[in-house]
Amino acid sequence: MKILVINAGSSSLKYQLIDMETENVMAKGLCERIGIDGHLKHTPLVGGKPVYNEDIALPTHAEAIAAVIDKLTSAEYGVVASMKEIDAVGHRVVHGGEKFACSVKIDDEVMAALEECTPFAPLHNPANITGINACREVMGDVPMVAVFDTAFHQTMPGKAFMYAVPYDYYKNDGIRRYGFHGTSHRYVSARCAELMGKPIEELKIVSCHMGNGSSLAAIDGGKCVDTSMGFTPLVGLPMGTRCGDLDAGVIQFIMNKYGMNIDEMLAVLNKKSGVLGVSGVSSDFRDLDNAAAEGNERAQLALDMFHYWVAKVAGSYVAAMNGVDAIIFTAGVGENSKSSRKAIAEYFGYLGVEIDDEANSKRGEDIMISTPDSKVKVFVIPTNEELVIARDTKAICC
Ligand code: AMP
């Protein structure tokens, strides 16, 4: 059985074709500049076929999907003989609101519900919907599943997801914490339980997804009980370019002082803030590490803030769960930056965390980086959201 996983953005479309017997990726790729001019990079990973990496006209998402199917099935670059070999398609959808607490098979009713969630994620959901429509147009009645970034966090109790604003904003308008990166938190926490050889129902886990966007999740017995992103992915930790938690009064002050409108203000908070804004150097942690090593104090401050916030939020989740068995690092920074992991773990001395420096220096694999005696276990687990999407799609469709 083969499942195509699609992650559609407004002008891009990422894909993987996964063989579910082995869970190996057969081919992966990226369509870029859809609706502008178009570029497709297609990488076959089985059969010794060459990589296709060319400019190609992609006026719409439907043309992008058609180009992907063409490459997946072509004699020169293909990994399957025809589209008939693709049993189902799994789509990443950013926001499922309160409607979707788990993945669902896509039909017209689900599409209508997705449209209703659009005001919550006006940049992301329309692109996801366009991707699904394009796929339905090109692939006909191949079964399809929507997997939501928000779904895993739907188990949060009211005390964690409510904002302390008039209740009607929640009741009438859906204003609450939703959380994001749920598919990643779900994957790494399940994998952590496997690595520990324990049922996830018996574990308290803090999952730290640290990439361009970063969020933490408190996972008690396999269920998310709190997470750091909110109504939007802007809040919680300081991120690459996003501000994280911020006093709303600062927004009013800056807008008044500099005569900015709300769109200009939000552009600053989304794109020019975070570690980029503080350091003035870069949103990329590799650049920050290099600049800090050369004595750039603002780069060091940005790194210190990030590490402090991860430790502070993680500590609050230990309190929320009344304990912790494991802490997981994942995503670009979590998987690759031994210095960030070390700096964050230094805050966890009170938990009896001890880091094994040799293990912490390894890369690219699931690994326990705490010493065997460490009271709380610390893991690096490369995330794999595509595999979760493919597994859910298989479970629902096949
Ligand atoms: P993601 O959003 O998960 O793809 O993460 C992307 C981010 O990971 C990049 O912007 C970098 O800041 C970070 N990253 C990737 N490799 C490294 C590395 N070797 N050291 C530090 N940060 C890294």
Image (cartoon, rainbow, N blue to C red):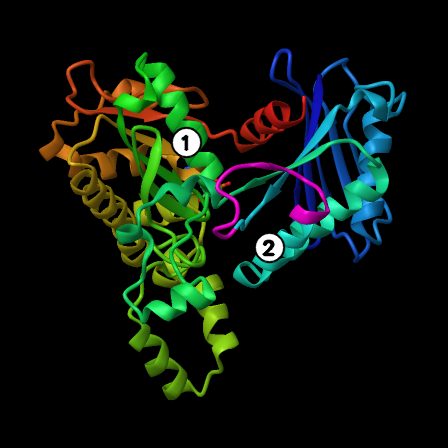
User: Which residues fall within the magenta stretch?
Assistant: 97-110
Label 2, residues with CA under 10 Å away: few <14, some 14-19, many ≥20: some
- Measuring from the top left, give residue 324's x and y in whole percent: 20, 30
Q: Which mark is residue 124?
A: 2
Q: Earlier in the sequence, mark 2 or mark 1?
A: 2
Task: Identify the image quadrant of residue 365.
Answer: top left
Ligand 1 quadrant in view: top left
**161 horizontally vs 365: left or right:** left
**137 horizontally vs 163: left or right:** right
Q: Secondary structure at mark 2?
A: loop
Q: Indicate the quadrant containing the C terminus: top left, top right, bottom left or bottom right.
A: top right
Q: Indicate the quadrant containing the N terminus: top left, top right, bottom left or bottom right.
A: top right
Which residue is drawn at the image coordinates 27% and 56% (left, top)?
A: 297
In the rendered structure, does residue 109 fall within the stretch colored magenta?
yes
Between 191 and 372, the one nearer to me in the picture: 191
- Measuring from the top left, give residue 184's x and y in whole percent: 46, 35
- Relative to 364, say whether 276 is above or below: below
Which residue is drawn at the image coordinates 38% and 70% (left, top)?
A: 168
Q: Which mark is residue 335?
A: 1
